Image: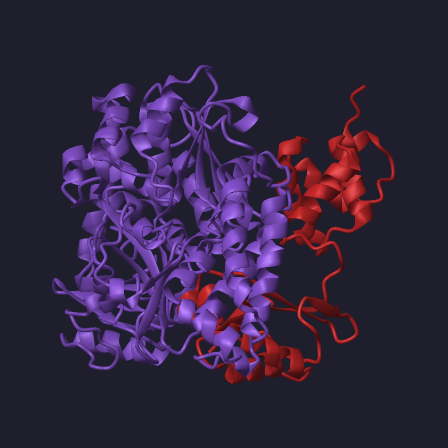
Chain colours: A red, B purple
Amino acid sequence: MIQTIDSIPQSPYPDMDRILREFPCRPDLLIEILHAAQQHFGYLGKELLGHIAARLDMPPSMVYGVASFYHSFHLNPPARHHCTVCLGTSCHIRGGSLLMKQLEQRLSIRANTTDYQRGITLDSVRCLGTCGMAPLAVLDTVIIGGSTAETITDEVCSRLEPTGDKTESAP
Amino acid sequence: MNATDLTMRAAIFRKRQADHTINVSVCSGSPCIAAGAENILTALRGLDLPVSVHTFGVGCMGPCSRGPLIRIESNGQVATYERMTTSLAASALLAHLEDRNQAEGLLSEEFPFFVGQQRIVLSNCGGIDPENLESALGAGAYGALARMMEEMTPEQVCAEIAASGLRGRGGGGYPTGTKWNLVRGAAGTRKFIVANGDEGDPGAFMDRTLMESDPHRLLEGMAIAGYAVGAKHGFIYVRGEYPLAARRLRLAIQQAEEAGILGRRVLDNRFSFSIRLRIGAGAFVCGEETALMASVMGQRGQPLIRPPYPAQRGLWGCSTLINNVETFGCIPPIIQNGASWFNSIGTPGNSGTKVFSISGDVATIGVLEVPLGTPLKKIVQMAGGVVGGNFKAAQTGGASGGCIPASHLDMPVDFDSLPHLGSIMGSGGMIIINDQRCMPDMARFFIDFCREESCGKCVPCRTGTEQLLRLLDRITQGEGAEEDLGRMKELCTLMQDASLCGLGMAAPTPVLSTLRWFRHEYEAHIRNGVCPSGVCSRGDI
């Protein structure tokens, strides 16, 4: 029996259904759908994944399997700020790991963890392809790099200060 | 739009461009944007000037570490400026109004990074506005596609590509013409074209540069391939970490569809071809073609055993042609200028040029294109030489590659030479390492990378990388034993022989290569418990 999305009453995720309407309901578009869902909700929670699975008529295990396979999909809620340190080859030899260490110390947070109380996630990425600025960190969407680990750490910290202006672009 | 409209629109754009007294292009590649290029563009556009000045954003100009870069064209003279700020860029423009150059930031005409290059794939990068179709048309985009459909049969196109000697630029070096003929000859009416833009090797950013700077080049190359092998649909798989490339590609596809270049009846011919974008989600293994196909189909990116190859059974069981982004970038110039022209560049068996992204301990980090077979030494010189110490090694081929020591600096860089030294040319990432760096630490870095990125499907790769990392951890912490080197070698050979896909098979290369050329550094860690370069003891690894 074919049931259209609109015919199901009181969906727990009306926003997700709206996103799904923009895609043909095909399993091969799962990754695109997950990208769109994450952009809207900020992360892919278990219930949401189950909802997507039901709508695409796929086993939830398969949808969860895909969501958990790829690094860019977050299964937990994001913090207010997201700081990513590049640990690609160029950044590595120019002190990327040192930068990570310093950020861990100054922000008192371990790499690849989230401090919900203070609203920050610290993690790493393997090469953003902007090796000219090595070493570098990305705070939310702003790339901060092209100098020493100390300067970058200072810059990240000052942008995270509650009083600081966070909307300004990189110098 | 047909072929005549194409030529006309190109001519109109060129005429308009020439009507401006001064043309100012601001590099809008992602490194330059990160360095503040957009502010410069806005500031220059806001200037009140007495003559007609056209200020526009262009793709990557090459020397990324010297950004933001701008180029000012007036009276037939071209001047390029590095490390611009809004005020410096404005004063440079004012200087050109007075018909002189500004000294500050001016790059000399003999700037080695530019002089030694032969740009075929990147010919329009840094010259055209990647977000403007007319700008691309003005530089000759889709000319090869139009000409091919007028003059050549699909068989002839495949024969031309085979005759050009073009080899896959993703690193494998497989003859592109052979692959095309395989897909053309494959059974079935439904076929697909896939462009592999999942540039995951750390330190590689050639494909990002091309996709961000000249997206129409990739679309044209794919359309030509579609015509040649009989495919109507194409996919571009872009790495998730490249949002700007994805945005510009999406825009380019939309523009090409609206102009009648893609879609039904390409340029008013009976051939139809559509392209869809797929965005990766952060998995290095998806650069492997079978894993990439799984990802295109919305699944976990886990590789399959080959054969069957994608040419036999690819997307949804149909014959599929997968080429790297740069390979597609080579196609239009080959069709336009002929196979023999392409063959005249490079060395026998390695025709054409190669784009390299050079980074690490060099004066100028960026993207450059040179004929295949160019000596490593020359490439390093073009990048301004080594900084912070003396040359120790060049790491080529990313996580699947090895290190080339100083004693082999004269080596020509091509598909066939580097394997003799235990490395590969790979997709073109090149990291220059000075003598302040520690090689076992480099090997550890790459193994840690492969361990993290191993998809976990086969045991040799999943467990092998884990064990190698433990051994390397021990060694770099000064707690290694003499037998560890033998153990590592044994484990490496096993992984090469028994892994399922290229990731696992190539993962040991950085270890084997550093063991071959820098064994003394491993021995110093083990015997004396110290890192000769002082890296491992600094506690930042």
Residue B367, picture quadrant: bottom left
Compared with residue B341, is residue B270 higher up or lower down, i.e. above or below? above
Q: Position of residue A12 (x, y in %)?
A: 85, 44
Q: Is residue B180 visible?
A: yes
Q: Position of residue B95 (x, y in %)?
A: 20, 78
Compared with residue B393, is residue A160 higher up or lower down, i.e. above or below? below
Classify the position of the C terminus of chain B by image quarter: bottom right
Which residue appears at 73% of the width and 33% of the height? Answer: A56
Q: Position of residue B32 (x, y in %)?
A: 39, 67
Q: How many marks?
A: 0
Q: Give B117 or B217, whichever is nearer the viewer.
A: B117
Q: Give B157 or B185, whichever is nearer the viewer.
A: B185
In the drawing, does residue B368 fall left or right of residue B396? Answer: left
Q: Give A3 or B238, whichever is nearer the viewer.
A: B238
| Residue at the right extreme of this rendering | A10
Q: Is residue B209 visible?
A: no
Which residue appears at 13% of the width and 74% of the height? Answer: B99
Compared with residue A104, is residue B332 higher up or lower down, i.e. above or below? above
Q: Give B262 or B477, whichever is nearer the viewer.
A: B477
In the drawing, does residue B284 fall left or right of residue B262? Answer: right
Q: Position of residue B175 (x, y in %)?
A: 31, 34
Which residue appears at 72% of the width and 42% of the height? Answer: A65
Which residue appears at 44% of the width and 49% of the height? Answer: B248
